[in-house]
Amino acid sequence: MAGHSPRLRLGVNIDHVATLRNARGGAHPDPLRAAQLALAAGADGITAHLREDRRHIDDRDLAALIDAKIPVNLEMAATDEMLKIALASRPAWCCLVPEHREERTTEGGLNVVGNANWLKTVVASLKRARISVSLFIEPDPRQIEAARDLGAEAVELHTGAWSNAVEGGNRDESGRLLAALQNAAREASRAGIEVHAGHGLGFANAGPVAAIPEIVELQIGHFLIGEAVFSGLEATIRQMRKLMDDSR
Ligand code: PXP
């Protein structure tokens, strides 16, 4: 297709390799091995969400990724505990997300407007340590403005509602949500903020998001790890890489 937009980066979230490992409590499958394979297959970075309850990735996994010089995007809640861990481990990126103990996965974007004071402190501390910061937000102009005021390098637009609408076959809703993502990407880019997107993306719905020219990075986890059961991680990532490149 077109081919005028900058190359789209792929961040592979390996949390669910750890979920599978933790189901038996041993060492297999190893998230570090998955990270190395993902990078060899065309991923540009690796994302790991260190949750308060350590339900998938744990502190040793994060240390192993950092020791192996993997380009890590550490997804985390903006808590004192996580800030301390991030400053000590120094990933390339931190993506700040809301976190609730009961949720199955991250549900909705961060309320940057409502938590600006605290987030400002967290973003400043991370940036002082030369860690780039992205804020996971809904495609909402008020959140983008607040992210810019905080000095975040990037926003990650939440694509979860879009992916649900596509899966549910709801054309009106998916059209409306895609337009919201397109507008938000344009506004963020105009404000000088790098635009990432993710959540719920897979072969069936990543194309239209990948085609948004201001988006420079997709974050994808659950689908890739699940599909790898059938096709292998390397082939799955190569196929997603091709889909993304063909959409630009
Ligand atoms: N981006 C963020 C901020 C997330 O919380 C997640 C899920 O961990 C993802 C991207 C990846 O979503 P999925 O696993 O649905 O691809």
Image (cartoon, grey):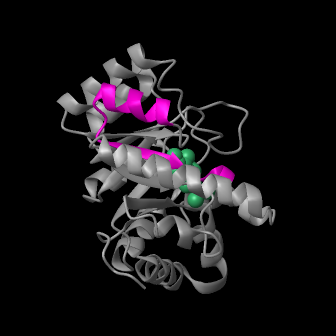
Residue at horizontal 34%, vertical 53%? 72
Residue farthest to the top, as pictured: 117
Specify whether residue 82 is in view. Answer: yes
Residue at horizontal 40%, vertical 51%? 186
Is 181 left or right of 36, judged from the image as shown?
right
Which quarter of the picture shows residue 3?
bottom left
Is 22 left or right of 59, judged from the image as shown?
right
Q: Of residues 220 and 148, which is closer to you in this image?
A: 148
Q: Of residues 6 and 32, which is closer to you in this image?
A: 6
Q: Of residues 1 and 202, which is closer to you in this image?
A: 1
Residue at horizontal 37%, vertical 58%? 214
Magenta residues, as a range? 141-161
Specify whether residue 26 is in view. Answer: no
Which quarter of the picture shows residue 9?
bottom left
- Quadrant housing the N terminus: bottom left
Above or below — where is 24 with respect to 103?
Answer: below
| Residue 217 place in picture, x, y as percent | 39, 60
Residue 128: in magenta span: no
| Residue 244 place in picture, x, y as percent | 45, 76
Is 98 left or right of 86, judged from the image as shown?
right
- Quadrant housing the C terminus: bottom left
| Residue 173 place in picture, x, y as percent | 74, 55
Residue 153: in magenta span: yes
